[in-house]
Structures are given as C-alpha cells and as structure tokens.
Amino acid sequence: METFELAKDYVRYNTWANGRLIEWLRNKPEAVLEQDFVSSFSGIRQTVYHILGVQEGWLKTLRHEMPENTYGKVYDGTMTDLFAALKANCEELEQFVEALTTDQLTELCSFWVPVRWPEFDEFFRPRTEIIQHAVTHATYHRGQVVTIGRNLGLTDAPMTDYMYYLLMAKPAEVA
C-alpha cells in the first residue's frame, strides 16, 4: 500500500476506533466517567477531551490554520456533547484527508508546540507524518482510557487495535 493510501486508511481507522470507544463509554455510569484517576489526565473525561483537543489542533495544522492550545484546560460540558464533538471531528478529519491529492499529502505544514517542546521554534513536516502522529497519539490515549476504565471496574472494553480494524472492519484485499 502506498504511503498516501496508508495515511488515508489511518484516519479511517481513527474514526472507527474512536467510534468503538465512544460506543463503549456512552452507556457507562456518568459518575465513573467523571471519577478522578491518576494518569496523564485526571480521568476518562479529561483524557477523551485531550484526544479531541489535540486532534482538533492537528486538523487545523493540516489546514494551515493556527490551532487553539487546549492543553491543561478542563472540559466542563456533558459527556454526550464530548462524544458528539469527538465523533464529528473524526469525520471532519477523515473527509479532509480523503480529499487531499498525493501532492497535498506530501506538502509541508508548519507548527509550533511550546507546551511540549519549548526548545523548538517551529516544525515543518509533511502532512503524512502529521496524520500518522495524530492517529498514533489518539491510539495511545485510547489505551489510557481503557486502563483507567478497567481500574474503575469497566471490564468490557472494545478491541481497537489497527490489525483488528484490518481484519474486522476493512474488506479483505485480494492479492
């Protein structure tokens, strides 16, 4: 598979995996979703909000727009609204990437992340690398959500591995 098609498949996977996570959490007790738990963020709510905030930022970067810094902000909306916003952003990211040409996928995007890497002034990376990072970042934090959930008694988490997506959600490709 060409790098360009793989980048597009990664965003499809990201939409699928975040959708499975949302469906899993949607019917869980709100008290559990709001419960504080020591991790990178203070629990499931804030971790899902972080996934959304960072994903929104990378989409803006891919569009050559200035992202908002949501790092460290506390989400105070409902879980239903948070899930809807994440789902909508996944679909928006997927539609944006699907519409890119090969040349646009290799185009450099500039970004600056002073919160995490203050030693760098500005980065320039191809869109394909930013897409790969955005999906990997979401995958990392989905794993944290599952771990937090397990520690809070939610033991029925869905499988969201990329290989599972390839085997179960994506039609088999003929060699």
Image (spheres, helix red, strand yellow):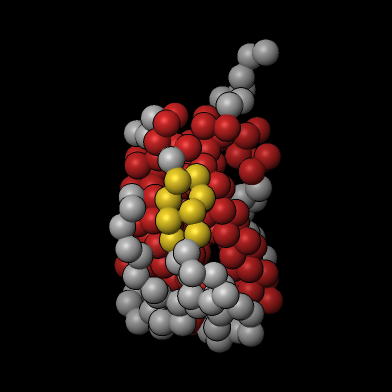
Residue 27 as seen in the image, left or right of residue 139: left
The x and y percentages for residue 33 are: 50, 76
Residue 159 as seen in the image, left or right of residue 30: right
Residue that protrudes farthest toward the top in the picture: 175
Q: Quadrant of residue 77?
A: bottom left
Q: Classify 112 as above or below 109.
A: below
Does residue 104 appear in the picture of this structure?
yes
Pick whichever, 88 or 102, lies toward us.
102
The x and y percentages for residue 113 are: 48, 70
The x and y percentages for residue 19 are: 47, 51
The x and y percentages for residue 53 are: 41, 67
Residue ID at (63%, 14%): 174
Quarter holding the N terminus is top right
Residue ID at (63%, 61%): 140
Residue ID at (67%, 13%): 175
Residue that protrudes farthest toward the front in the picture: 121
Q: Quadrant of residue 163?
A: top right
